[in-house]
Amino acid sequence: MKTTDFSKYLTEFFSVYLPGEKGASTNTIASYRDTFVLFLLFNKDKRNISAEKLQLKLITKNSVVEFLNWLESERGCTPATRNVRLAAIHSFFRYVQYQNPENMQEWQRILSIPVKRAEKPVINYLTVDGIKVLLAEPNQLTHTGRRDLALLSLMYSSGARVQEIIDLTPSMVRLDPPCIVKLVGKGNKARIVPLMEEQVEHLRIYMEENHLTEPYANQYPLFSNSRKEKLTRAGITYILKKYASQARVKYPHLIPDNLSCHCLRHSIAMHMLQSGVNLVYIRDILGHTSVQVTEIYAKTDSKQKREAIEKAYHDITPKALPSWQTNGDLLDWLKGFNR
């Protein structure tokens, strides 16, 4: 069967351009793959064009917009998810315009499709007391409890993303002072995050117990399941939610109902900000591309806003009159009393 130009460019996009030239992470490639699986499904079901017959000339700005609307109306996707799918399509056609410039005008029309304004979610984070009660839940008398405590405490203290924790190996952790962890984030960008000695104590116990400090274990997964396989996103989410549910029973005011792994990352960022740490340092620890991304924590912190207003406040308003002086009838009565 003869291949189409679309299948040719899509194959090269995934097998050569994204991993080789672009250096995209496995998560990004997986997300883009899911987008085009949906795009092929849309063309088959709604346009009656099977995958083996889809050609570049059949893809227009209008058809892409129809696909994006289909995601929202029939698949129930949020505007944020729609924008993720659009980003994948934009990336593909930025690649195609250099490989197939004959239809440059149409490719640029597709690239002109704007992202949709999405409501920004409220940052959910735990207070310092909330973190304390959460980390008090794992049973340190059990092997699993010690692993879970090391995992959750490292997630919080390093501000790591879930995938960064999944990808950790023992070689990326330094337990001797100065204690550090090397995290590899989006775009395969690595960063070094300092850790306090007190923070790594549970991690040290866990690693020594599981012989992860031995040279032969350097490239083993730092956190693994009972089959010695690296933990998954679902696995780490299950661990967090289990202890969050236990802590919520005792301290419902400290543990919110909706608690995700990213909340631990938000929590350390907020706690550093509230302690006076400069946004630039918080940006570097979290691995943000710009301090503007990190500023979201400053916008969220109502306590810091109130303190800033209180420091800048000057008493310039006249004193309010006592309430009895504003009662005209009573004042008139008193003035005329006993005359």
Image (spheres, helix red, strand yellow):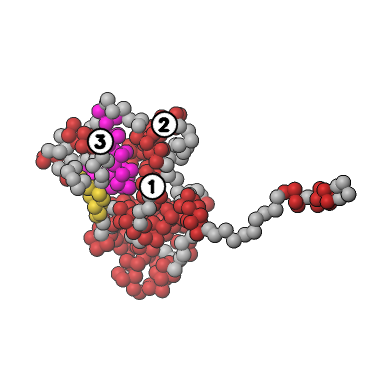
Confirm whether residue 7 shows in the render: no
Marks 1 and 3, how far apart in space?
21 Å
Q: Main secondary structure of the magenta part?
A: helix
Of badges 1 and 3, nearer the viewer stands 1
Single out the residue that lies furthest toward the left. Answer: 215
Circle nearer the N terminus (1, 2): 2
For residue 149, which quarter of the picture?
Answer: top left
Single out the residue that lies furthest toward the front. Answer: 339
Q: What residue is drawn where x is 23% and y is 37%?
A: 201
Q: Which residue is mark 3?
A: 202
Give the crowd class for mark 3: few <14, some 14-19, many >=20 residues within 10 Å: some
Q: Which residue is mark 2?
A: 247
Confirm whether residue 273 shows in the render: yes
The reply, left or right, for residue 20 in relation to residue 251 is left
Single out the residue that lies furthest toward the top. Answer: 141
Marks 1 and 2, how far apart in space?
20 Å
Relative image position of residue 23 (x, y in whole percent): 25, 59
Of badges 1 and 2, nearer the viewer stands 1
The reply, left or right, for residue 302 in relation to residue 146 is right
Where disc 2 sits, the SS reads helix
What stretch of residues is rendered in magenta? 143-170
Relative image position of residue 171 (x, y in whole percent): 17, 45
